Each structure stands twice: as structure tokens, then as C-alpha cells.
Amino acid sequence: MDWTRVLSQAAGELIAPTTAAYALAAIGLNVHFGFTGLLNMGQAGFMLLGAYGFAIATIQGASFWLALLIAALCGAAFALVLGIPTLKLRGDYLAIVTISAAEIIRMLGRSTIFDDYTGGSSGLTGNSFKDGFQSLSFLPEGSTTIGPWTYVNNGSDSWWLRVVSWSVVLLAVLFVWLLTRSPWGRVLKGIREDEDAVRALGKNVFGYKMQALVTGGVFGALAGVLYVLPRAVQPDSMGRTMTFWVWTVLLLGGAATVFGPVAGSMIFFALYMLVRSGMRAAIPEAAMSSTQVEQFGGMLVGIVLMALVIFRPQGIFGNKKELAFDGH
């Protein structure tokens, strides 16, 4: 049993591009739920739209920066479409609309109607949209070892991708930190606590909610770009399970905190890899297959989320006095 290899794989998840993508998606969800009280249950829809916007624009000949802008605009447009008919209603309606809309996007993505653009259920291969991003790298060819981590400098699973991914996450953290200390951020928290009181002060509650939905949606769309850069765009890999995991990351770290989504993502994926790798190493294949290990890992994620909501709704780093899962 090679526990050194198991621990090395778990440590690798701490700085993995996928971990950074989930952290950024959770930061966006934190703007929605943690600071504004909006129940967005379709963050995967924002991520899938951003991934499609970036990949399709790149394939059609757009530069990296233009494709990134298109991805962000896709997230903003999706937020407007969802928010206009629902934000004046109770938060429950937003939850229903977002989870339904995310599934519609996934089904449209895998539909043969748009096969020429989305690739249908097969998706878009990574080689068709990564060249623009890879060409921006200033790192030399070869591989580099830093601590327990050894990766190639350039490529789909590289230091270059990690540097860019975590730089984006740090910029997002700084942006949210500044927002929460601004008058705009204080109004959002006021809406989360008692929107009637904020409305009585003359504030346009609908407008503030829409701004928060768009801001978090843009973060979600950019997270989708980070998520597909190490792999392909596969609509079925960005469905309800992805939203479920983003919520787990957010609640684990702590909603309404600045660093909670980042810490939650790192802790979640490191522990998840530790459990899966440890089970593969400790349990014989005859007793439990690799597929069963994956399924058991998914069950553990569900149990962890249930335990968090029941016993520590404010998460590891959250403040129970400020926010619980029900937004009160």
C-alpha cells in the first residue's frame, strides 16, 4: 500500500486547476447566496454557458481575450434572462428557475440541433480551443518541481494553467473583499437580512439583486472557462452534480465569508481525493471496483453536505450570527 502516493495525489488537489475553477464558481455563488440571499441552484448552467462561449468563440477565430469577454457576457446575459421574471418574487422561485434553466442549457448543448457548434453529446475537444491560451505562456518548456508537486510548465495539466487559474481566483477574492466593504456590499447584506427595510429606505432592491446576480453569474461563467481548459467541453459533466458540489464547497468553507469558498474548495477536493485514493489502495479490487469507489465517494459528499446543513450551516470559517443556510 503506497500511502506516499496517496498523500501526494491529495496534496496535488490543493492547487489543481479544477479546484481553482470550483473556488471561483463558489465565489460567484457566495455573491448570490452569502451576501444577497439569492438561492441560485443552477451555477453549473453559468459555467457551461461560459465554457461554450469561450470555446465556440475561439473555434470561430476569436482571440483569447475576446473569447474570454464573450464568456463573461454569456454569464451576464443568462443572469438577466433568469432575473427579470423572478427577482421580484420569493427566493424559492429563483431556485426553481435556475435549476431548470441549467438543465435546459445542458440538454440544448447535447442536442443535435446545435451539433455543428457544440459537438452534441460528444462536446468540444480541448485541442480545438486551447491554443490561444497556451500561446500566452511565458514559461519555458520542460517540467518544474516545487515542494511535493511536479508538473510540466506548459500544457493541459501544467504550471502555466495553475498560475493563471489561481491568479484569477485571487483577483476575484480581492474584488469581493472590496465589494463587501463598499456601500454597495452593505446594501446587499441589508437585502439578505430584510429587503423590506432596505426598500423602505428608498433603495431599488430589484436593481441591487440583479447586479448581484449578474456579478456572480460572470464569476460562474469564468469558472466554466477555467474548468474546461484542462479538458474538453462535455455538457454532461457540467450538470446538477456540479452545482451540488459548488454548494458543498461554499457551505464547507462558509457562506458570507471572503476566503471561505477558496478554503472550502481546497479542503473538499483534497479530502475527496484522499478518500478515493485511500480506498483504492486499501480495498482489494475483488471487494470494491473502481466504479464502486467513485459511487461511494459521491455518497460521502452527500453525507458531508447533509451534516453541514444540519450541524454547522455557517461552515468551517463562517459566523453563525451573520448567516445560516436558511439565510437568517
Image: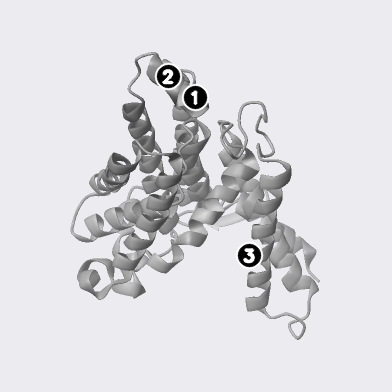
Tell me, for residue 194, which label it has, or none: 1
Tell me, for residue 298, which label it has, or none: 3
Q: CA distance from mark 1 to mark 2?
A: 7 Å
What percent of the width, then of the height, locates residue 34? 53, 34
Look at label 1 and name its amino acid: Asp
What percent of the width, then of the height, locates residue 124? 32, 68
Task: Give the structural element (helix, strand or loop) at label 1.
Answer: helix
Q: From the viewer's perspective, is residue 96 above or below residue 30?
A: below
Look at label 2 and name its amino acid: Val
Circles 1 and 3: CB atoms closer than 8 Å: no
Q: Number of labelled discs?
A: 3
Q: Residue at x 75, y 86 (%)?
A: 286
Query: Which residue is disc 2 drawn over?
Result: 198
Q: From the viewer's perspective, is residue 226 above or below residue 215?
A: below
In the displayed image of the protein, which residue is found farthest to the bottom?
286
Circles 1 and 2: CB atoms closer than 8 Å: yes
Task: Give the structural element (helix, strand or loop) at label 3.
Answer: helix
